[in-house]
Amino acid sequence: MTALEDTFRTRTGEAPSGTWFAPGRVNLIGEHTDYNDGFCMPFALPHRVTVAAGPRKDGQWVITSQNKHETVTVAPADLTPGRPGWSSYAAGVVWALRQAGYDIAGADLVLESDVPVGAGLSSSAALECAVLTALAELNGLDIAGMDRARLARTAENEFVGAPTGLMDQAASTLCTAGHALFFDCRDLTVEQVPFDPATFGVEVLVLDTNTPHSLVDSEYAERRTSCHEAARQLGVTALREVSADGLGDALTALADPLLRKRVRHVVTENERVRQARQALRTGSLDELAPLLDQSHASMRDDFEITVPTVDLAVETARAAGALGARMTGGGFGGCIIALVPAGRTDEVGEEVARAFAEAGYAAPAWFTATPSAGAGRLR
Ligand code: ADP
Ligand code: MG
């Protein structure tokens, strides 16, 4: 019996029906492209939310987070959007499933997670997708992968009230081990692109800058608004429709220099995601690594979503031997991702830690990420 099953049994007096999981994710490339109907290419982390679950007869959902050391009881009457607290990520999934017409019986859920929280590695989507996977199977529901992702996103957008795109939930649900997930945010189609860092002779370093997030919500809203305004002025539904070849004309057509910069990021970033997919297909590190650098420069100079800690981390990682590096995630803090020659990730991480100490920044945390499996049943 696993420790989680043991906790479940201690709390409920019964063995769980099963144990399910869903991972956090990191985005290899394609930032702020999702709400422009564009492309991104995340992969699942080995870090995951694991949930032991079993049915309850009283029609309630009783949810324990081992990380929070807390158990919350959710009755059907509690399923009102905007409910505060961590349990709303789980309650929101019940709500979204019921909104979609599924009958969801009461359940006991005991979860634990090793996904860093609030680092932009999507601990929230991991929690939603793990709970959704468990509840879908407990209730005998056959829901297609992308529909699961959309239901989990509905929980986060409409119940929790966080306006995120679909990438996080799609990655947590649909990724497969040894692959990055090329995701077309307009067509909602995916392609599993083989990505084994070892075949490139590299490891993927993920370094959390531990930057306190501020202004994220207002800045995020501003970027969305700017992109939608630029699309309106260009007469397209979304910036996805502006091709790399058409970028020059689009920039000429826009009078506002700020909108020009925002558009240049989105259009070139979409192109980089496609080029990165091609580089993975052909196994060309020489093509892949510079795309990360270019993506970072674009986020820093055109989209203006990086902050000094993040820029320092990227510059230091590059100087310490990383072959390509970029901020990953929505911006204004969070993590960087770097392609580092195999066996040298700690060396690069320590260099960044040294530079942070010198600059008076909080110490970073880091790990090596291998493309891992999406949500599923564990036991
Ligand atoms: P991110 O998804 O980047 O980690 P978010 O702010 O979107 O950050 O989501 C973090 C929130 O998700 C936490 O504040 C908490 O409410 C919830 N959460 C994530 N993991 C857990 C967990 N293991 N137990 C309870 N709540 C969790
Ligand atoms: Mg999140």
Image (spheres, rainbow, N blue to C red):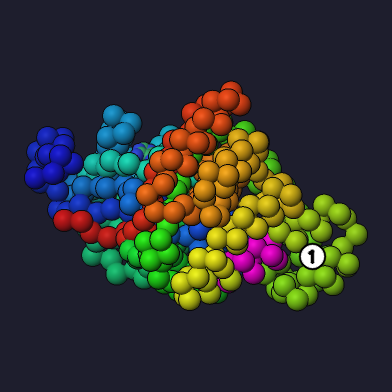
Horizontal and vertical percent for residue 248? 82, 70
Is the residue at mark 1 in contact range of ligand 2, meaning its CB lies under 8 Å from it?
no
Specify the quadrant that holds the N terminus: top left
Magenta part of the protein: which range? 266-274
Instruction: Residue 210: give x, y in percent of width and height.
Output: 51, 33
Which quadrant is home to the C terminus? bottom left
- Give the residue drawn at x 60%, y 62%: 291
Number of other residues with Cα within 10 Å of mark 1, as a class: few under 14, some 14 to 19, many 20 or more: few
Residue in the image at 84% along x and 65% along y: 251
Q: Main secondary structure of the magenta part?
A: helix
- At x 88%, y 55%, the residue is 256
Vertical arrangement, residue 18 with respect to residue 187, above or below: above
**Residue bearing the label numbered 1:** 232
Is 123 rendered above or below residue 241? above
Mark 1 lies on a secondary structure that is helix
Q: Quadrant of residue 134?
A: bottom left
Residue at far right of view: 255
Quarter of the image where one finds residue 117: top left
Asked whether, in this view, residue 295 is left or right of residue 154, the answer is: right
**Which residue shows up at 32% across the image and 41% down it?**
114
Residue placed most toward the observer, 115 or 288: 288
Residue 269 counted in the magenta span? yes
x, y percent for residue 207: 47, 42
Q: Is residue 343 visible?
A: yes
Amino acid carrying label 1: it is: Arg
